[in-house]
Amino acid sequence: MRIRRMPLIVFMLLGIGFAQNLANAQTITAAEQAAVAGPWSGRWTAPEGWLYEAAMTLRVAASGTVDGEINWTMRKSPRPADQKKLGMSGMELIRGTYHAASGAFVLEGYDKKDPNTILGLDKYRLIASDDRRTLAGVTAHHDRWNAQFWLTRN
C-alpha cells in the first residue's frame, strides 16, 4: 500500500481546534471582528484542473458566528461541456464559526444563487495569517479535502 504525503497545511488545519466546543465561550473584540470581517478576494483550485476566482464578504459576530457570501467566477474547468461557461458567475451563501484564538474559520455553504449551474456547495477550513491580511486552507471538494482556497484582504 502506498502512503500519500499530505501537505503540512492539512495537518495544521485538522489539528488546530476545529471542535465546535472551542467557540462556545469566546467573546471576540470589536477590533478582531473588524480585522476579519468584510471583503476578501482570491482563488480556489482543485487538482482535476478547476480554477475559480472568489470575492468573499464575511460578517463576524462577537460570539464567533460567521455568515457571508462568496461570489464565484469559473475560470477553468476540466469538463469539455463547461468550456462555454468559463467567465460565468454565481453566489454561494456561507455560515460557520470563527475561532479567534487560533485564527481558524470553519465554514460551509448552505445555499446558492447559481443561474448558470457552475457551483456546488462546499465546506471550508481556513486559517488567518497573524496580521489578518491572508486566509488560506482547504475545502471538502466532494469529501476529498484536496482543494485549496487562498484569499487576501481587499
Image (spheres, rainbow, N blue to C red):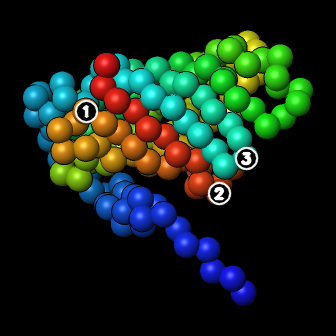
Q: Secondary structure at mark 1?
A: loop
Q: Residues within 10 Å of mark 2 (few under 14, many from 20)?
A: few
Q: Position of residue 153 (x, y in %)?
A: 30, 25
CA gap between label 3 and label 1 equals 28 Å
- Which of the marked residues, 1 or 2, is nearer the chain's N terminus? 1
CA gap between label 3 and label 2 equals 12 Å
Q: Which residue is mark 1?
A: 133
CA gap between label 1 and label 2 equals 27 Å
Q: Is residue 76 visible?
A: yes
Is residue 142 placed above or below 2 in the rendered structure? above
Q: Position of residue 34 (x, y in %)?
A: 18, 25
In contact (CB < 8 Å): disc 1 and disc 2: no
Q: Which residue is mark 2?
A: 144
Is residue 153 placed above or below 8 in the rendered structure? above
Along the horizontal axis of the image, is 62 left or right of 90?
A: left
Taking the spot 25% from the left edge, 33% from the top edge, the residue there is: 133
Along the horizontal axis of the image, is 39 left or right of 50?
A: left
Q: Position of residue 83 (x, y in %)?
A: 82, 23
Q: Quadrant of the C terminus?
A: top left
Q: Which residue is mark 3?
A: 48
Is residue 25 placed above or below 98 in the rendered structure? below
Q: Quadrant of the N terminus?
A: bottom right
Taking the spot 15% from the left edge, 33% from the top edge, the residue there is: 32
In contact (CB < 8 Å): disc 3 and disc 2: no
Viewer-side residue, 74 vs 58: 74
Q: Secondary structure at mark 3?
A: loop
Look at label 2 and name its amino acid: Arg
- Which of the marked residues, 3 or 1, is nearer the chain's N terminus? 3
